[in-house]
Amino acid sequence: MLTNYDLTRRDLLKTTLGVGLVALGGRIATATAADTSALPLSGEAGGAAFPKLNGQPDESFWGKVREQFDLLPGLAFLNNGTLGPVPHSVSSVHERVDRELYRDPRNSFRQGDIDAVREKIAALINADPDEITLTHSTTEGINIFGHGLDLRAGDEVILGTQEHAAAFNAYAGIEKRFGVKVVKVQIPVTPQNAAQVIEAYEKAITPRTRLIVVSHVSYSSGLVAPVKELAELAHRRGLLISVDAAQSFGVIPLDIKALGVDHYAAPGQKWLLAGTGTGFSYFKKDIQDRVWPLTGFYDPASTAPHANSARRYEHTGQINVSAALGIGAAVDFHKAIGPANIEKRDRELSTQLRNGLAKINGVKLYTSADPALSSALTVFSIRGLTPEETVKALQDRYQVFIRTINTGEIVGVRASTHFYNTHDEVERLLAAAKKLAG
């Protein structure tokens, strides 16, 4: 017998098909975790309502959500932090828009539709559409911001030791070219508390410091940085703060105004499940006049529409329209499930994994057990096995797919648990880790 939150693949697909072009009703933006009933998901196939949830989603609901993905049967894919699968509602937009452009390329820019995507992103994170620029990746967003600043010889930029190569490489180039000094701050792999992280950055600030660059969630340890407090610290000292959101956006609900950062570079292909070659960056309105575009021409005196908005950073040539509109569909899918529901589910699965790993003799955890310092990534190692051997054994013997992490300080493997994953998949990884550790 179907419960009141059972839905078939066809049901949810009907609600989200074509959402790259049609905005969700305003009620979605204000829905709480326990109130996602009667949310209008307009689409080409009609306006079927999202199934009513009496309280929190249960396993039946998450099972139906899983059916929206074409993951290989039997594969426990736990590497969403590298690339997430795409739900049917997103892939249908990709296919439809590409087909339309192949048949009739006259309207090849679809600027109105792309601006609608910008508005969806802005509404999701509590920003102004003029603060959103669409990008191809987090890396591109980091480079647009860093290379756009008027940094000069002797200026200092602070990066923590757990930052991704995308950030280190961007600022290494700036350091080499302009004589800017990159200051690396040693961040504990598993800090005791957020204050310890804040103190490390504060001690590194000098009169020459201009910018703090920090990952909201570290790709290498899963550490959740106290970004709001770091933004307050930066602004007290007259600094800018740029955030790498590769492992946070799509997991941790975001109010960008409350977070208080100047720049936030996010991907689409990871936790948002929007497909490859997608992303966006937030540029706080009152700092945009300090960031020059990386490509294209910019005239600060221009009175052309949107010339002095974040759109100035999109002058990269012909955009991949189907990919861009797919971001809109992914945002709709994300909002239909509910950001709070997604975060709760992701934390539930990652907590199950970390608690299980902590009980296995021979397993070392690099990710904090403190919910304030951890999210959906779990990094660990198995005694006697290299990261490469662990990944190969898990995939070949158990059909569990994760990735290696080797930063010198952290030598292990990383599992990503997202809302489409199941408790059974987590248990399969735990059982496999126990056998391998034995």
Image (cartoon, rainbow, N blue to C red):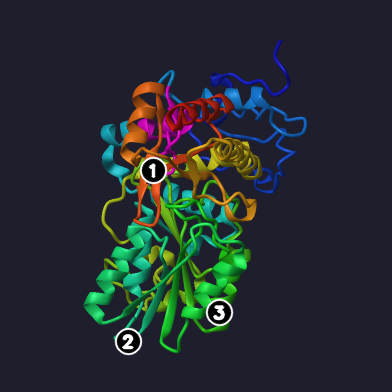
Look at 41% across and 78% down and name the residue there. Answer: 290
**Quick one: quadrant of the C terminus?**
top left
Using the numbered discs, state the Cα–Cα distance from disc 2 to disc 1 in whole angstroms.
35 Å
Q: Residue 362: image x %, image y %?
A: 48, 38
Q: Which mark is residue 235?
A: 3
Q: Of all residues shown, which one is farthest toward the right?
A: 54
* Left or right: 183 in relation to 367: left
Q: Nearer the viewer, mark 3 or mark 2?
A: 2
- In this view, the residue farthest toward the bottom is 207
Amino acid at the residue labelled 1: Thr
The stretch in magenta equals: 75-97
Residue 255 position, x and y percent, is 61, 58
301 in relation to 192, above or below: below
Identify the element where label 1 is drawn. Answer: loop
* N-term mark: 2 or 1: 1
Amino acid marked by disc 3: His
Mark 3–mark 1 contact, CB under 8 Å? no
The Cα–Cα distance between marks 3 and 2, rounded to whole angstroms, is 20 Å
Q: Nearer the viewer, residue 334 or 165?
A: 165
The quarter of the displayed image where residue 276 is located: top left
Residue 91 falls within the magenta-colored stretch: yes
Residue 64, relative to residue 185: is it above or below? Answer: above
Label drawn at residue 82:
1
Q: Which mark is residue 154?
A: 2
- Return the residue nearer the eye: 274 or 39: 274
Query: Dot 3: what SS?
Result: helix
- The amino acid pointed to by label 2 is Gly
